[in-house]
Image (cartoon, helix red, strand yellow):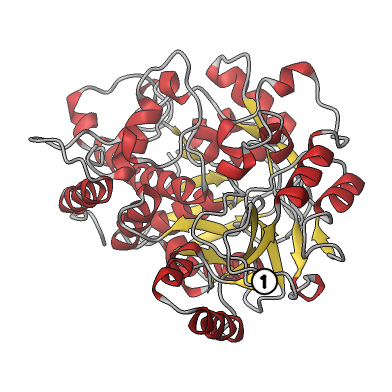
Amino acid sequence: MNKYITIIGGGLAGCEAAYQIAKRGIKVKLYEMKPKKFSPAHSNKDLAEIVCSNSFKSNLLTNACGLLKEELRRLDSLLIKIADETSVPAGQALAVDREEFSHKVTESIKNNELIEIINEEVTDIEDIAKEGIVIVATGPLTSDGLAKQIQEITGQDKLYFYDAAAPIVSKDSINFYIAFYGDRYSQEKRKEETVEQWKKRLEKQKSEEQSYINLPMSKEEYERFWQELVNAEVVTLHEFEKREIFEGCMPIEIMAKRGIDTLRFGPLKPVGFDDPRTAKRPYALVQLRQDDKQASIYNLVGFQTNLKYGEQKRVFSMIPGLENAEFVKYGVMHRNTYINSSKLLDETYNLKTNKNIYFAGQITGVEGYVESISSGLVAGINAVSKLQYFEKRGFGDGEKNHGDFGNEEKNSEIVFSEFTVIGALAKYISTFNEKFQPMNANFGILPELEGKKIKDKRERYMKLAERSLENLNTTFLI
């Protein structure tokens, strides 16, 4: 058996797995097909490219993704550390400068003497698995050739659904006679202020380059926008593709067709804001989130879309403040590949039918950046544990690496408590479910608190967070 571990895919999960393996003294061969070959949604030659959004979501412990990030920080996650280092203002959320984040991850991986980066496309997982342990972290945009082989290895008929990314605009092209800075939480202070105090605070926020730019809409403006949005031309999808769109990344034009007020109770909700021009709550409100360190480009929050590029320019320019917007990047819909992990994987992301193969990232059905990093960490440390177990027992390739090893092998696995978000995600993807769908971090997948039910949601979530951190296993850290 090889004395190194192979990773296929240099995305978030693959890079995290590589770091976790190398820090335990094991060599890594990391295969990444870029820059020789790019998927339809990728354009950056660096590792760990972020495609859909630059947000890693909330940092609050009362948010499941915020709790997951804290768990990962305590477990020495390389990618969360770099995300913190490359963060841009985003209120209580963690958002990053995409280019700087990818570059720093790439440099960290390149400079690790135990990690060898091989810029080639892999088309045969089984050959690699015959010689040693492999982690398949090819992500939601797995190449067609490799996806076909994964399909054969797992015996599945279907490996994909579709999701969409939001457009990005230049800050210099935004009309600040209409737009204003601030987030929902700071805006709530308005209740305690005079109009004059409120206006001074807004000016101060603008000078401090606050995280969100807000575009208020009147009833008439919103309804005109909605009418054009629901009738705009989209990139044509096949019928089977339409059925595979993931609910958590719903294109805004599809969401809008569910009803004229749907957006006002979703990504365009105006709650917590006052329009500086009227000192009253707007009818609807679009938020833009900083997308780079220099605060020169902003993405439209919640505006994942499959509209044709020309239609994006036409319809989104109807939003007050974006009438002269320069679109740095248009939204795009792309295929996401994932396996039926609930049938195929265990809680360490190990393939049940071949102990030499692990999967990590969104291909396992964890949905989101932080969730992918979490899976890479779990798969990485368990791949090391498995390699050490094989060496201790003198197993090479062949039948010993397939099927069930029994209790001794099970005891070598590092399974996180289901009370942690890391463990709850691993349990979710490995628990059989006939209607298995990708899952984000959320408190609903954690076991309920014992004792009397706590009605206050924030208090209940904090109790769940406290329990999670108490049950976080860090004893294996090196």
Total of numbered circles in the picture? 1
Badge 1: residue crowd in 10 Å (few <14, some 14–19, many ≥20): few
Q: At 50% from the left edge and 48% from the top edge, which residue is drawn?
A: 13
Residue sitting nearer the eye, 34 or 40: 40
User: Above or below — where is 342 with respect to 327?
Assistant: above
Q: Is 135 on the left or on the right of 75, as rendered?
A: right
Query: In this view, which residue lies farthest toward the left?
Result: 451
Q: Quadrant of the N terminus?
A: top left
Q: Is residue 236 left or right of residue 255?
A: right
Q: Secondary structure at mark 1?
A: loop
Q: Looking at the image, which residue sits at the far right?
A: 310
Residue drawn at x 66%, y 34% as measured from the top left: 255
Q: Position of residue 228 (x, y in %)?
A: 84, 40
What residue is drawn where x is 77% and y is 17%? Answer: 239
Name the spot of residue 124 as percent of width and height, x first: 64, 31
Whether residue 71 sits left or right of residue 154 in the image: it is: left
Using the rendered image of the protein, determine whether residue 223 is visible from the camera's viewpoint: yes
Q: Quadrant of residue 460?
A: top left
Residue underneath mark 1: 277
Q: Can you see residue 113?
A: no
Residue 253 found in image quarter: top right
Above/below status of 323 relative to 153: below
Look at the picture and state if 8 lies above or below 356.
below
Instruction: Check the picture and name the quadrant holding the C terminus.
Output: bottom left
Q: Position of residue 334 (x, y in %)?
A: 73, 38
Comparing 28 with 44, the one in front is 44
Q: State the image coordinates of residue 266 (x, y, percent, origin top left).
A: 57, 43
Q: Is residue 384 left or right of residue 266?
A: left
Q: Residue at x 27, y 36 (%)?
A: 446
**Nearer the observer, 82 or 296:** 296
In the image, what residue type sits under mark 1?
Arg
